[in-house]
């Protein structure tokens, strides 16, 4: 029996529903996808896209009907994307689906709809009362974020021994990776304290304590961030932890944008997402690519098999 995968369709004004429709034939061969959308919005989207809705396109009716406005930030589309996500999450948590795949939401639309979260990861952390860990990438390279959507000016104060140590231990418990590079915070990982350095001291102590708790040397670092993504460095370790968002994701997306996915770790459910946004600039123009979405589904299916 193929596993059921709950799929929240994201912001209806973006590319999510196009991706779901275009990739349905391929992913339905390996799983039973259930799309969280109502039939009126689905028919409206399919008409704009000039795409036929597959006969086996199973939906879970949720949310209200409204006018789709391709490429536009909208309170209504923000509210709907959250409703789709919330229903898919509840469905998965109750064991009705084996995993959850989320298509992209627009953070500004969530804000307009007064959704009290910056994105899926924040919402998942609150829902499960735990600290969800955001990891992005593919088999060639995975990057986890110690601070995900934290403004850069606030990251330094978060880099404290206990917080970093607990993050490393939670990360290891979720992945069981055998070797993980932890990137420094300052340029050149502070050059032994000549460029800042207090953050690197906290990171270094946390690495040592986490390795001691695990009983083997899993984490190495702090590594120099601008050297960690070179081909030779990645041969040594291609599982990395970045202290803040762009230092980890800019090189990852430059290398593997079309193949990368977004995975939530440290949760009681399996959740993956595409590693791109709503792409309002190409919404409803039949230009959306499906690779990241298909990889997300495949990751969930493989994770289900591992847990079985």
Image: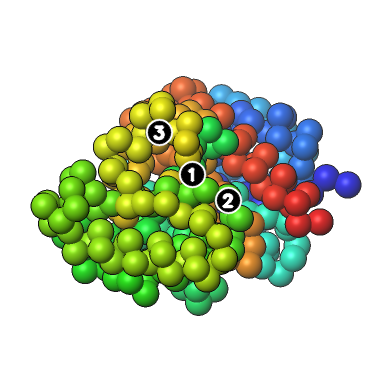
- Classify mark 1: helix, strand or loop: strand
Q: Mark 1 points at which residue?
A: 239
Residue most extreme to the right: 1
Q: Mark 3 points at which residue?
A: 233
x 74%, y 65%: residue:
95
Disc 1/disc 2 C-alpha distance (Å): 8 Å
x 54%, y 37%: residue:
138
Question: Is residue 151 shown left or right of residue 103?
Answer: left
Sequence-wise, the earlier of marks 1 and 2 is 2
- Classify mark 2: helix, strand or loop: loop
Question: Is residue 241 shown left or right of residue 226?
Answer: right
For label 2, the crowd category at 10 Å Cα-Cα, with few meaning under 14, some 14 to 19 and many 20 or more, is few
Q: Name the residue under label 2.
A: 177
Tell whether label 2 touches label 1 (CB within 8 Å). yes
The C terminus lies in which quarter of the figure? bottom right
Q: Mark 1, mark 3: which one is toward the viewer?
A: 3
């Amino acid at each position: 029996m193929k596993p059921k995968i709950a799929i929240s369709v994201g912001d209806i004004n973006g590319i999510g529903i196009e991706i779901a429709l275009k990739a349905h034939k391929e992913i339905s061969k390996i799983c039973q996808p259930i799309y969280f959308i109502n039939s009126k919005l689905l028919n409206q989207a399919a008409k704009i896209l000039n795409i036929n809705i597959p006969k086996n396109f199973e939906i879970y009716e949720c949310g209200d009907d409204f006018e789709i406005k391709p490429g536009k930030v909208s309170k209504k589309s923000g509210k709907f994307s959250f409703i789709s996500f919330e229903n898919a999450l509840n469905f998965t948590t109750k064991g009705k689906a084996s995993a959850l795949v989320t298509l992209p939401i627009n953070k500004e639309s969530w804000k307009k709809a007064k959704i009290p979260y910056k994105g899926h990861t924040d919402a998942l952390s609150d829902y499960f009362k735990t600290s969800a860990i955001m990891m992005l990438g593919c088999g060639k390279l995975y990057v986890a974020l110690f601070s995900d959507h934290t403004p850069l000016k606030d990251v330094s104060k978060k880099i404290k021994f206990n917080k970093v140590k607990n993050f490393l231990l939670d990360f290891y418990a979720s992945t069981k990776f055998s070797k993980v590079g932890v990137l420094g915070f300052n340029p050149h990982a502070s050059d032994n304290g000549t460029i800042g350095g207090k953050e690197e001291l906290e990171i270094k102590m946390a690495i040592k304590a986490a390795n001691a708790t695990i009983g083997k040397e899993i984490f190495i670092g702090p590594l120099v961030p601008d050297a960690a993504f070179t081909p030779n460095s990645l041969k040594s370790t291609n599982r990395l932890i970045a202290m803040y968002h762009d230092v980890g994701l800019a090189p990852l997306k430059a290398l593997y944008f079309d193949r990368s996915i977004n995975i939530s770790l440290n949760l009681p459910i399996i959740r993956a997402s595409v590693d791109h946004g709503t792409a309002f600039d190409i919404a409803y123009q039949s230009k959306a690519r499906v690779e990241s979405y298909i990889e997300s589904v495949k990751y969930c299916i493989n994770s289900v098999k591992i847990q079985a």
